[in-house]
Image (cartoon, helix red, strand yellow):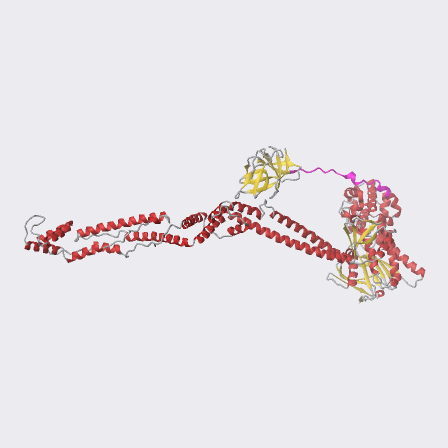
Amino acid sequence: MIEKVKGLSICGRCFSKKTNLAFFPNDNDRIAIVYGKNGSGKSTISDGFSQIASGEDTEELSASLIDRADNEIGLVPESKIFVFNEKYIDENVKIDADGLGTIILLGGQVDLQADIDRYTALLAAAQEEHDVAQTALESFGNKNNPLSPDYHFARIKKVLQGDWATTDAAIKGNKINSKVTEEVVREIGGLSVSETKEQLQQKFDETKALLDKVADVTTSYPVPIGGVEFTDGFERVICDLLAKLVEKPVLTERESMILSMIQSGRQSIVEAAKNDFSDGATTVCPYCFREIDDEYRRSLINSINKVLNKDVDEHKAELRAISFPGFGQDYSHFTDLDAGLVKEIQEQIENCQKLIEQYKATIQLKLNSIYNPVNMAPIGLENSIQQLNVLLSKLESKRQEFVDAIQRRKAILRDLLLINKKIAHLQIGQAYRDYLKQQREMRAAEAKLQTKQKEVNETSEHLKALELQKSNVGLAIENINNALDYVFFSHGRLSIELKNDKYYLKSNGNDVKPKSVSLGERNIIALCYFFTQILSNQDIGRLYQDEELVVIDDPISSFDFENKVGISSFLRYQTHKIIKGNAKSKILFLTHDLSTFSDLQKIADEMEKSFKKQKLGVSIKGRAFELQGRTLSDPIKSINEYRDLLNMIFSYAMGNTEGLSLVIGNSMRRALEAFSTFIYGTGIAEVSFDPKVVKSLGNHSRYFENLMYRLVLHGESHFETRVYALQDDLSFYRFISEEEKQRTCKEVLCFMYCLNPDHIESHIPDAIREIQKWMADISTNEEFDIKDNPQKRIIHLYDIPLSAGLGEDILDSDTPFVEYETDIEDGDFALHVSGDSMEPEIPDGSIVFVKKQSEIADGISGAFFLNGEVYCKKLLHKDGEVFLCSNNAKYKPIEIHDGDTLIVYGKIVKVLC
């Protein structure tokens, strides 16, 4: 099937439309060599063949094989396509390192290594995150660190060991203070308290007093305390009776006189007289001592009775029937229950009694003047009695509580203990909240550490599994090493050795450092592996006999220059084996290097002649093309033109300037542009900055970068856009002397020779000896070295000094400063130190450089803000307390209390005396 293949039909990327490329237009065309500049489409062509070989299509590129009638043909199973290009190298060869040396990864190992590299990076990241999480968790375990729950537990414990523990023990009757355990802390801290501390303290005192009374079993209050009973509205009844009007009878003169006496308040005299004259034994008037007879006596009694009629008697009876509540009970023995309340009751009773006496006096006044109404409003006796009853009810409640308390002493004890805990809850409130917060953060840190540990474990296990898979990949190491010996013309110059399930790269039997393995050496290994892979799964007696199409993109130009002869020889050997092994097999070479193109042409020509001479029965023909404008054409013209340019430049440099003065500048640019584009895929202006170019220029890189390009090649013309333009010379080179132009020609050839000596030798071999002489005059990099002067930087030096003694006002945005020039790299700002507390480390009057940070370790000098002042001190955590300490022993540590504001400004990194 391969014998039918004329070429490739391709569309995509740089091939904007479907294009047919005939690499093997005739029956005997077995070797095709294509020269093309970078960007001409060579990589796209090799990728097209790769897609056909793998059977995988992509949206950006479509490709198919075509026969001589330009019909598309499919790839049959017995025919194979093998493609060697940069993609193949990246996918099949990787240089890595371990502790024993350089590892070489081939074929399937590369994909595995990509996964291994990814999981190695993941493991490193996971381990780093694990270490960060572990460090964060460790800070929670330092009881001297405010981040630690133990730090806040110590604060809580210290508070509870005071009032709560003492009171709790006293309530329980213990001589030793109660222990403060974690369970106690959680119980007290977890209480829900709505009362204020003052309310709780009052409740505690009352309950404690009740408990003390209950403890005295001799005290007893068996009789309930009742209220004062009274009829609602009785005050209104009294007032109505006092205001009642008794009608006066029609009276004689004597009866009027009697009534007048009654109205004047002498009713008692009238009633006494009635009693006296009602006695039949009375014969003499007890008032005037005049003798009286029975008729007079009866007449007088009738007159009195007329005045003191039945209505009067009834009204008097009503007034005398008025009764008031009694207050005879003594409440003084209830003083122990509540002395204040008992006093209030007694005062209220006295108030009620005063009101009653006022009513009684008014009633007596009415009795003494029965016909005179007394008009008065209620004076508040009922309300006073009601108030008294409220007080009596309270006293009864306390009596009942006391009686109940005797029966529930244990319950009172529990209440008292609870009140004590509630008071303690308020005392430790903030500290307990800090304790819970840090516990939550610590648990979160523990969970995060567990998660990170799980990630580390899982990633590590997966990485081990990948390493195990990599160790199982087998290779024909002997064949690869034989190929390497062939390329280097030396046994063991570069070899692969299997050890510990890994393939180590050796040079003359010694381990090779990864950085010592050049890109060219990597590509040589890839090429050797490529041809070894072609022979995989073939019987030893049928090697190279399978039908195959081999595509090789840039087989020599991507290798180190000193190995090109070996590579060319190796390619010649493999080409001969493939072409001779199967009469249908074909090889396609793609290159952007003219010297490589020429070498491959020689291989094809030699092989064509060899096959004819040996009469092997196999006819082959080699074809050479230039890929230009997305089409294949005859390459001879371009190659010869480039060679002519180089010969012209050399001739001018040797002094043959006649007729060339106006065109030599443009010729140099065209040659350099072609050289840089062909070899490096970049223009003149960029080539001397290319890292690969700089490395190849070695100790002359600065000369070519800073002198030649700046002086000679500065201009707007580039070979890519104005290859044949001559006007640049008229505008630039007419001002340069012939000697300068000749020197520049020498430098251009030296530049190209320094980068690719084989390339120059293949095109102008007669010039090599002269060019080598010129190279001796090229300046080295050391002659261009410029000593760098370190740059100083400006930071703020604040005028207000940092206190190293008793403290200064805090720095704020209005604090004046000066710009301070320094070459000290660390430190964000500087401050004056005032005071000797940090001597001898930080003398009085020195300047300190402060690096901003929000945390600082114990024992490190730093700048701190504390309650409106700034200090230069050292931080210390000890026994749950925090201190700012001095170096000078005469200064006591400053203790940080709850509620203080402490801020770390930063660490002192430099002291200038």
- Farthest-out residue, front: 218
- As displayed, is residue 870 above or below residue 447? above
Q: Would you say 712 lies left or right of 177 here?
A: right
774 or 227, which is in the foreground? 227
- Which image quarter is the N terminus in? bottom right
Residue numbers of the magenta segment: 772-793
Q: Can residue 91 be seen? A: no
Instruction: Please check the rendered image and state whether residue 782 is part of the magenta-colored stretch, yes or no.
Output: yes
State the quadrant of the C terminus.
top right
Q: Which residue is rendered at x = 68% and y = 56% of the image?
A: 458
Whether residue 574 is visible, yes or no, is yes
**Residue drawn 8% across the image and 55% down it:** 298
- Find residue 10 and report its horizontal and vertical position in percent: 78, 62
Q: Give yes or no for residue 492 being in the magenta stretch.
A: no
Between 33 and 220, the residue placed more toward the observer is 220
**Residue 683 location (% of width, % of height):** 77, 49
Place of residue 841 in the rendered image (x, y in percent of width and height, measured from the top left): 63, 35
Image: 523 above or below 880: below
Residue depicted at x 8% and y 50%:
285
Please tell me in which quadrant of the rendered image residue 317 appears.
Answer: bottom left
User: What is the tally of numbered marks visible in this picture?
Assistant: 0
Q: Is residue 65 above or below residue 317?
A: below
- Residue 547: percent from the left, percent from the top? 85, 64
Foreground residue, 314 or 873? 314
